[in-house]
Image: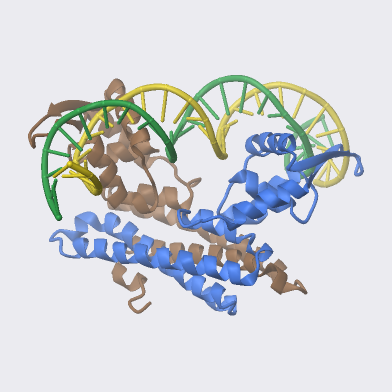
Chain colours: A blue, B brown, C green, D yellow
Amino acid sequence: MLEFIILGTLFSQNLSGYDIRKCIENGIGMFYKASYGSVYPILAKLTNKGFVTCNEDSQDGRKKKIYQITEEGRLSFMEWLQKDESQDSIEAFMARVFFFDKLPEEVSKKKIQKYEYYLEEYEESLLEQRKKYMDLPNREDYFYKISTLYFGICKLQSMIKWCRVARKKEELENLIDKDI
Amino acid sequence: MLEFIILGTLFSQNLSGYDIRKCIENGIGMFYKASYGSVYPILAKLTNKGFVTCNEDSQDGRKKKIYQITEEGRLSFMEWLQKDESQDSIEAFMARVFFFDKLPEEVSKKKIQKYEYYLEEYEESLLEQRKKYMDLPNREDYFYKISTLYFGICKLQSMIKWCRVARKKEELENLIDKDI
DNA sequence: AACTACATGTAAGAGGTTACATGATTCA
DNA sequence: TGAATCATGTAACCTCTTACATGTAGTT
């Protein structure tokens, strides 16, 4: 996964390993973490595969290794971006969506639609689970078990809502609370 | 982590490895996945440590290995449950909260409060990030980058809302949408 | 002078997953 | 009788984290 996130980060800019990590942190850092201990070895691997090339640079006094994506790298990235993601967790899916601007609009919309179906099925199964708890006599003893389930449902519902807004390319501002 | 989730699952019931996995799937499966390839080796490890004991059972015709938690196992679990979780991802935190019914009420409330502070700080930083995108001239080219950020904010806000409700032990029903 | 941020890397190992191997039982 | 589910396990591998090692450049 990180392999492709790095390729995606290098898609339209040449960066050093250090900068790649910062870029990930400030971008999809919310859904995906990358440590130096993983970034550097993967850059070496990508170089071996011919997916990136490396140029030494000492412009700002410091020596840097600036990585540049190759045509093969771009192909590999686009292949990953388009492949089936229905098994992804919400976080993994969103890490992918982060790069959806590189996809034709119909393709990205279809992908979101498909994931939305999966989420709706999942929601059904959680609402079913909820019924079991509702009939229990000593609900207080299960407060936190029930409340984690409720958070799960909440999260799914907000993701479904997000899908609908994103598919229609509607104004995103309405999604978030102004007065929390 | 899985080590403690297994101990938590065995806290008030004796189960086979197979049943433990099912139990996790139906419980915190939403936040945490466990495969057989991880459950069985961990059960062996826990047995070696003396945190669980194992009894062969062939009641329903099938041979099962029923695991039972020991006093040391309970101590180890409670220690994990009480230790600082401020570095946890939301998913990891919720997997922990799943077992909060085993904690005194004041302790669990304090833990949720503390995590809530961390989330609020995080929210600030994301709202800050949002400003950067808002000033960009060609926002359409960044639609999906912006929308993943918005989802991140959404998720945080619903988690903060959850914390407030859970801390007050308010009615959870209000959290979820009835008419999605 | 000390501290923070920049910059690159490695070694050990945690913490899993996937695929395979095996066999019993239940149900359509 | 064949498929699904129950049931336990292993071996190979993957992916990443943590901690360490090393050194430079700017900032207080």
Q: In this picture, is B152 found above or below B84?
A: below
Residue B3 seen: no
Q: In this picture, is A123 found above or below B78?
A: below
Residue A25 located left or right of residue A61: left
The foreground one among B69 and B66 is B66
**Which residue is located at x 59 percent, y 79 percent?**
A171
Residue A97 seen: yes
Q: Position of residue B49 (x, y in %)?
A: 31, 22
**Which residue is located at x 53 percent, y 65 percent?**
A111
The foreground one among A128 and A147 is A128
Q: Position of residue B61 (x, y in %)?
A: 8, 34
Q: Where is residue A143 in the image (x, y as percent from the top left)?
A: 26, 58
Question: Looking at the rendering, which quadrant does residue B176 occupy?
Answer: bottom left
Question: Looking at the rendering, which quadrant does residue B62 occupy?
Answer: top left
Q: Position of residue D26 (x, y in %)?
A: 86, 44
The foreground one among A72 and B89 is A72
**Which residue is located at x 15 percent, y 64 percent?**
A135
